[in-house]
Image: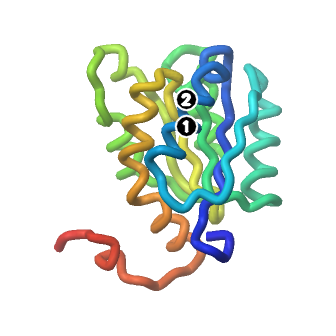
């Protein structure tokens, strides 16, 4: 990734609670993921057109490795991240989404999380909840798979079993 097996990561805070949670999510990524070249945080507030432009720029022009949105990923009308992300993805990752929805669900309200995950060309894009403990559980789950997903999107023919998959 980025030519040196390191990740360029962008964290986008959505809504007031996403803005507040984004630094905690960025810290969790730094704590749980290896090979991070850079991590940046941006507050996009409640502006879906801005979020759309930022994600497109990061993925299409800057070609960052990972885009994480934090917040606005629930079931309410103001929760625009899942719908916006679904429109931007070129390939979904349903297995990742399924696991994200099951990750550390301790409260009944956690079942209302609607986050999406997939690839926009060669960038791994994931919606995270604004609840830091839940977001951290998802980040922990993604740690061993994110690098491999990016490698495969960029044309690697390396066998998936080489990454610890069991037959």
The residue depicted at 47 percent of the width and 52 percent of the height is: 33
Tell me residue 136's x, y (percent).
43, 34
Q: The residue tagged with tag 2: helix, strand or loop?
A: helix
Q: How many marks?
A: 2
Task: Characterize the local packing of mark 1: few (<14), some (14-19) or many (20 or more) Cα atoms within 10 angstroms.
Answer: few
- For label 2, the residue is 24
**Foreground: 135 or 35?**
35
The residue depicted at 38 percent of the width and 58 percent of the height is: 144
The residue depicted at 63 percent of the width and 47 percent of the height is: 67
Residue at the outermost bottom position: 157
In the displayed structure, would residue 150 be above or below residue 94?
below
Residue 161: image quadrant is bottom left
Quadrant of image for the C terminus: bottom left
Tell me residue 75's x, y (percent).
49, 19
In the drawing, does residue 125 fall left or right of residue 50?
left
Residue at the outermost front position: 31
- For label 1, the residue is 27
Quadrant of image for the N terminus: bottom right
In the rendered structure, are the residues bearing label 1 and label 2 in contact, judged by CB atoms less than 8 Å apart? yes
Tell me residue 96's x, y (percent).
39, 49
Residue 52 bears which disc, if any?
none
In the displayed structure, would residue 13 be above or below residue 122?
above
Q: How is the image coloured?
A: rainbow
Tell me residue 166's x, y (percent).
19, 70
Residue 62: image quadrant is bottom right
Q: The residue tagged with tag 1: helix, strand or loop?
A: helix
The residue depicted at 47 percent of the width and 25 percent of the height is: 132
Task: Characterize the local packing of mark 2: few (<14), some (14-19) or many (20 or more) Cα atoms within 10 angstroms.
Answer: some
């Amino acid at each position: 990734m980025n030519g040196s097996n390191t990740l360029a990561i962008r964290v986008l805070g959505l809504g007031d609670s996403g803005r507040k949670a984004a630094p905690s999510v960025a810290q969790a990524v730094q704590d749980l993921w290896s090979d991070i070249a850079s991590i940046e945080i941006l507050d996009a507030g409640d502006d879906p057109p801005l979020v759309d432009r930022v994600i497109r720029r990061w993925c299409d022009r800057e070609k960052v490795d990972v885009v994480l949105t934090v917040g606005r990923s629930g079931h309410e009308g103001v929760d625009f991240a899942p719908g916006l992300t679904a429109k931007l993805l070129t390939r979904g990752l349903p297995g990742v989404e399924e696991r994200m929805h099951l990750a550390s669900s301790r409260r009944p309200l956690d079942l209302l999380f609607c986050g999406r995950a997939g690839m926009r060309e060669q960038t791994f894009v994931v919606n995270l909840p604004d609840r830091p403990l839940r977001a951290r559980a998802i980040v922990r789950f993604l740690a061993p798979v994110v690098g491999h997903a990016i490698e495969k999107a960029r044309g690697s023919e390396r066998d998936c079993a080489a990454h610890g998959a069991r037959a």
